[in-house]
Image (cartoon, rainbow, N blue to C red):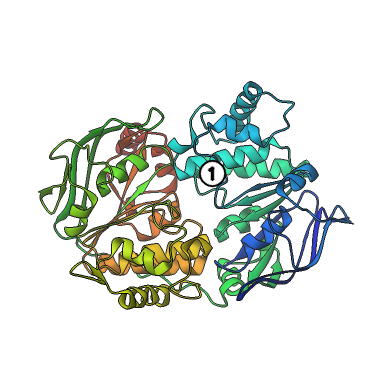
């Protein structure tokens, strides 16, 4: 059978970095093919070459057996290649429908695009509102828009980068069923994910990259997570030690937090009640867009409109306090948006370290040598793959930037750490390291609130779980008493019914 896509000897060099080094890859018609590798292994560079966003320095690309040079994403789409980037390509000031329509055949009008978006989104369990401006969407909702846009092009090869990070377990299964249906109809799928269980469940074959080179090609169903990890990072990730311990005093106490949204498309917070104690991890599960963004803004101080007395930190009313005052009390925050909120894209890592750290400031003067030493320490401690402290934040891969941003806040020895999506887009080895750092903080007495759409992650590191749906927060449940199925039900706002059923079981 002639491969749908064939790469022979693909190489791509950046200054000081050989991102792809003689990569070979074959994808057959109707095959679901995974590309696996740690952060910085060259996965994104490779798929950008396939999609025409980058040009290889050497090697040959064949499409249906014929050599081609894909000069642009438009040329890729014309061939039948669709892609969902890890970092989204959406115009903030336009609506969902307008963003999608820009990439469609202009024989379709904007109204037709709205109808098709609604149909495809519903069929894939990726519901989005076509009329919403993109700037009002959470990161997870933006990813849904990208997925829907790619599917509307009826691709012959669909490239998906971490597509399940915004889905409930039930919606993930619906998506997998749809991808299998697409593959059965002859569509090839190039699937990038750090979730080894997903790759083993879904994909027919897997090409593993390490340091830009192919370290193996395997049938995932015949592999274990441990064997895939060894191919990817040369070792198995270290096991986490999550010991049971008695939590300390209440650090964060939230009561009666109701807050109207600032955006007409946002989610109103309704009577939120939550507490986090010293020496415990409380996990917040839920599908993106159900009020997590608004809750995090209220807790971090970015939105200081909360009712007085509704948010207390170490007994202090901070509902109307700003970010700086909360930081002085020991609160640290890692947002889900890496570029733009977590880090300034064009600034160096040293300058980005200074954004939330005053270690290198003395009497109003910045000690630049100390700033660079701080950034260098973070790079070394958290294994950030970067040439040095003067490297621009935007030049790092998503996973390495995540490690730097989270490391900046962990290294500050917080008393309360609020983290959104701590390991989104991070490889299995780095994810294990990040989770280990969070548990170490917890064992040192820090209180942690972790918002994540990775259920496996929350079950692994949390002492208690709550679920957010439609601006409301469920009661907390000990992680040892929770199940994936129960949490999946609660994600639809059904915790009252589920609780009653459990009581009568």
The residue that disc 1 covers is 143
Residue displayed at 57% across by 77% down: 234
Can see residue 242? Answer: no
Q: Quadrant of residue 269?
A: top left
**339 above or below 438?**
above
Asked which quadrant contains residue 423, the reply is bottom left
Instruction: Please indicate whether residue 268 sits to the left or right of residue 144 in the image.
Output: left
Image quarter for residue 379?
bottom left
Q: Name the element at disc 1.
A: helix
Residue 251 appears left or right of 407: left
Residue 499 seen from this side: yes
For residue 209, side relative to residue 246 (left or right): right
Q: Quadrant of the C terminus?
A: top left
Residue at 52% in and 74% down: 236
Where 87 falls versus 475 (above or below)?
below
List x then y, in percent, for residue 183: 74, 45
Question: How many residues crowd mark 1 within 10 Å: few (<14), some (14–19), many (20+)?
Answer: many
Please provide percent x and percent y for residue 166: 49, 45
Residue at the image position 35 percent from the left and 68 percent from the top = 437
Q: Which residue is drawn at the image coordinates 62% and 54% (left, top)?
A: 201
**Residue 163 appears at what percent x and percent y?**
57, 48
Image label count: 1
User: What is the quadrant of the N terminus in the image?
Assistant: bottom right
Query: 144 or 203, which is in the foreground?
Result: 144
Indicate whether 327 appears above or below 309.
Answer: below
Q: Percent position (x, y) of residue 198?
A: 58, 55
Farthest top residue in view: 111
């Amino acid at each position: 059978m002639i491969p749908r896509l064939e790469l022979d000897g693909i190489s791509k060099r950046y200054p000081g970095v050989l991102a792809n080094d003689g990569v070979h890859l074959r994808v057959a018609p109707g095959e679901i093919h995974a590309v696996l590798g740690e952060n910085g292994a060259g996965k994104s560079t490779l798929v950008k070459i396939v999609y025409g966003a980058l040009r290889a320095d050497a090697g040959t690309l064949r499409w249906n057996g014929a050599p081609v040079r894909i000069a642009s994403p438009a040329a890729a789409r014309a061939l039948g290649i669709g892609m969902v980037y890890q970092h989204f390509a959406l115009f903030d000031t336009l609506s969902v429908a307008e963003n999608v329509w820009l990439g469609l055949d202009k024989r379709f009008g904007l109204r037709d695009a709205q109808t098709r978006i609604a149909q495809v989104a519903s069929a894939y369990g990726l519901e989005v509102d076509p009329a919403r401006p993109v700037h009002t969407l959470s990161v997870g909702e933006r990813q849904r828009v990208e997925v829907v846009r790619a599917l509307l092009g009826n691709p012959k090869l669909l490239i998906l980068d971490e597509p399940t990070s915004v889905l409930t377990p039930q919606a993930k299964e619906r998506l997998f069923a749809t991808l299998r249906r697409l593959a059965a109809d002859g569509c090839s799928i190039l699937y990038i994910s750090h979730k080894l269980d997903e790759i083993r469940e879904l994909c027919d074959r897997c090409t593993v990259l390490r340091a830009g080179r192919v370290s193996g090609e395997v049938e995932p169903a015949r592999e274990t997570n441990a064997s895939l990890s060894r191919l990817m990072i040369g070792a198995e990730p270290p096991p986490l030690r999550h010991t049971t311990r008695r939590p300390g005093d209440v650090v964060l106490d939230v009561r009666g937090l109701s807050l109207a949204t600032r955006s007409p498309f946002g989610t109103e917070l309704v009577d939120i009640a939550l507490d986090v104690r010293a020496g415990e991890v409380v996990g917040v599960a839920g599908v993106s867009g159900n009020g997590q963004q608004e809750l995090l803004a209220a807790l971090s101080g970015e939105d200081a409109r909360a009712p007085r007395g509704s948010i207390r930190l170490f007994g202090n009313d901070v509902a109307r306090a700003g970010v700086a005052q909360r930081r002085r009390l020991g609160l640290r925050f890692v947002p889900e948006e890496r570029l733009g909120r977590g880090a300034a894209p064009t600034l160096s890592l040293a300058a980005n370290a200074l954004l939330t750290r005053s270690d290198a400031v003395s009497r109003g003067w910045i000690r630049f040598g100390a700033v660079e030493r701080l950034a260098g320490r973070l790079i070394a401690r958290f294994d950030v793959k970067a040439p040095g402290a003067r490297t621009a934040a935007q030049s790092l891969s998503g996973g390495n930037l995540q490690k730097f941003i989270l490391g900046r806040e962990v290294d500050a020895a917080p008393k309360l750490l609020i983290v959104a999506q701590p390991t989104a887009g991070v490889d299995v080895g780095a994810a294990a390291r990040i989770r280990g750092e969070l548990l170490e903080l917890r064992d040192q007495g820090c209180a942690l609130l972790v918002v994540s759409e990775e259920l496996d992650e929350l079950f692994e590191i949390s002492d208690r779980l709550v679920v957010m749906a439609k601006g409301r927060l469920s009661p907390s449940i000990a992680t040892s008493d929770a199940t994936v199925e129960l949490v999946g039900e609660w994600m639809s706002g059904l915790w009252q019914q589920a609780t009653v059923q459990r009581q009568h079981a």
